[in-house]
Amino acid sequence: MSAQTLDTERLQPYLEQNLPGFSGTVTAEKFAGGQSNPTFRLSAGGRHYVLRRKPPGELLASAHAVDREFRVISALGATDVPVPHAYLLCEDESIIGSMFYIMEYLEGRVFWDPTLPEIADNAERAAMYDEMNRVLAALHSVDVEAVGLSDFGRPGNYYARQISRWTKQYRASETEHSEAMEALIAWLPENMPADDGAVSLVHGDYRLDNVMFHPSEPRIIAVLDWELSTLGHPLADLAYQVMAWQLPGDAGLRGLQGVDRQLLGLPDDSEYIDAYCRRTGREGIDHWNFYLVFCFFRLAAILQGVKKRALMGNASSPEAEAKGALVEPLARYGVDLIHKP
């Protein structure tokens, strides 16, 4: 069974026994996009659900943690962070060949282009970006102990642990030598800011196409794709989102490089950062360049894993090989930032 298909014959009896209210014959349709955990819309008895699974086959250690996704979505259900309702987690790999979970299906809008060409009004575009900012601040304000996530990661030394983790992940999936990646691996540990003690729940992949907006309002109804979430430093999410805007809009990168943001009603980096700081009570951010360089390195390491999975034949999307080709350009962007004041 490939990452593109689902064994509904084996899934059917499991859902009948374990998913309250389930009835009818289940059908499955894979969502487009996404390079990590294959995601399907299930339909049965006039109702819809979403299934996310680990890809089948050989995987890198600690990757594709759908059980962690299920846990964090369940924990956030009663907070100000909008998430789908989580129904069940199945750790029995004999059902469809890998671990999976079932969550609520929501009708909404997911946008892929950060210029939001589908939105005609500048005020609405501005409101949507401000809503992303609001939700990110809400996420970083969650009381992790109160929601039962105090053990969701190791607090403190977040960047030291992340640099180590993604260096190891990169080495495990390395397919050719990259001078740019080697430069980042050497530079980051030597230029890491002192740990300021800030700890929050972090999403790990917070960006436009991982949030779902209301069908007609500039309001987020769900934050999606929590595979990389952990306890960490809140600036990691902020820098990751801002980092993505530095990229060109072509070659599959979907950035805002060269875009006249004011013309479109989009905030510039400083406006977005200032709004986040106001919402989270920060007076400012030191060492911003380091946080951006780290994000380029981390994304390059993630996409190297995508490239390796494509070569192994178990990536979740046919676009995986093209995404893997972005590793070197991303690493070079990071190296370029090292030399900027």
Image: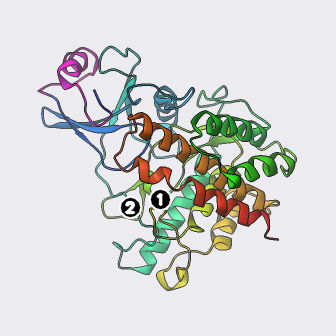
Vertical arrangement, residue 215 with respect to residue 181, above or below: below
The magenta span reads 3-25
- Front-most of residues 272 and 242: 242
- Front-most of residues 26 and 136: 26
Whether residue 143 can be seen here: no
Tell me if label 2 and label 1 are in contact, CB under 8 Å.
yes
Q: Which residue is mark 1?
A: 208
- Tell whether 232 sits left or right of 215: right
Where in the figure is residue 329, as x and y percent of width and height?
Answer: 59, 61
Helix, strand, or loop for circle 2? loop
Task: Tell me the kind of residue under disc 1.
Answer: Leu
Vertical arrangement, residue 337 with respect to residue 36, above or below: below
Task: Tell me the kind of residue under disc 2.
Answer: Phe
Picture quadrant of residue 44? top left
Vertical arrangement, residue 280 with respect to residue 309, above or below: below
Question: In the current view of this chain or complex, which residue is farthest to the bottom?
Answer: 263
> Residue at coordinates 73% horizontally, 65% vertically from top-left?
337
Q: In the rendered structure, does residue 159 fall within the stretch colored magenta?
A: no
Question: In the current view of this chain or complex, which residue is farthest to the front?
Answer: 176
Residue neighbourhood size for the residue with mark 1, other residues' Cα within 10 Å, grouped as few (<14), some (14–19), many (≥20)? many
Colour mapping: rainbow
- Front-most of residues 154 and 64: 64
| Image quarter hosting the N terminus | top left
Helix, strand, or loop for circle 1? helix
- Tell whether 116 sits left or right of 235: left
Q: Which residue is mark 2?
A: 111
